[in-house]
Amino acid sequence: MKSLFTFITLIFFGNIQAQNNFPKADIIDTGYGDLTVQPIKHGSLVLTYNGKTIYVDPTGGKKAYTGIAKPDMILITDIHGDHFNMETIQELDAKNAVIIAPEVVANKLTYTYKQNSIALKNEQGVHRMGLFISAVPMYNLPETEDSRHTKGRGNGYTISIEDFNIYISGDTSAIQEMKMLYGIDLAFVCMNLPYTMDINEASEGVLAFQPKIMYPYHYRGKGMISDTKKFKELVDAENLEIEVRLRDWYMK
């Protein structure tokens, strides 16, 4: 039965990719069922597990998600427009989706969506849909009042499927809270100056918390694309047990 489900999932996501020129989706065995990872663009991705679809930082309008099931849950990391876009959420038929976001984002949701929203501060967590979602710090170093990402405003997230743990960094430096993460099976880590960190700092952070599988994401912005191949070389040189997967978080 599991192999049949995996086959159907591959066909389904293959059709989606053909429709919208998506990068290939990955299917990861969590030990409790398959998790599908679909890169979208920049800091956006879609996770599908146990028949539930989770959008992370959806932007780009409905067109960017052609063929993908409507969201059951939306995670938003920060207030900036490349992470929080109210127009996209409205276009996605997300009225029944659970929206988990920092307070600064939750306060800007329209009434229809605010009813199903959960505002989390750093270190707070919530159980939904058989998952435990915890908000973790994300911020720039050095800490300054005029920083693009100040401590406590935005959220990175961990998602736990039983003891299978996913980390989504959001926009951050290689902060101590990242380096102290433990038991991460799957990670999505940003790298894009001047908004987050360069590949050297990102590799330092990843080598500290040692996820089993990690994807560089949010690695391109206006005028800059981080050298993710060099990043992989830096990690591989120190720890080949960390599987660095390079995928195309493409720009449309």
Image (spheres, rainbow, N blue to C red):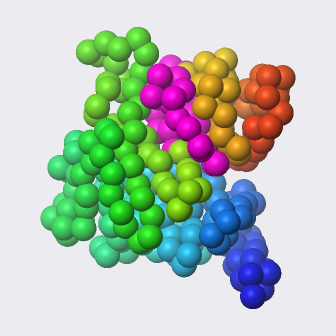
Q: Quadrant of the N terminus?
A: bottom right
Examine the structure image and report whether residue 179 is included in the region drawn in magenta.
yes
Q: Is residue 2 above or below residue 241?
A: below
User: Where are the magenta residues, as a range?
Assistant: 168-194
In this orientation, which residue lies closer to the viewer: 235 or 11? 235
In this orientation, which residue lies closer to the viewer: 15 or 103? 103
x, y (%) of residue 197? 55, 22
Using the rendered view, name the quadrant where residue 67 is placed. Answer: bottom right
In this orientation, which residue lies closer to the viewer: 149 or 52? 52
Left or right for 106, reference 41: left
Q: Residue at x 33, y 67 (%)?
A: 98
Q: Residue at x 67, y 66 (%)?
A: 31
Residue 79 visible here? no
Instruction: Assign the magenta stretch its main secondary structure.
Output: loop
Q: Is residue 140 above or below residue 82?
A: above
Q: Residue at x 63, y 48 (%)?
A: 186
Using the rendered view, name the quadrant where residue 5 is placed. Answer: bottom right
Left or right for 99, reference 206: left
Q: Residue at x 46, y 33 (%)?
A: 171
x, y (%) of residue 243? 77, 42
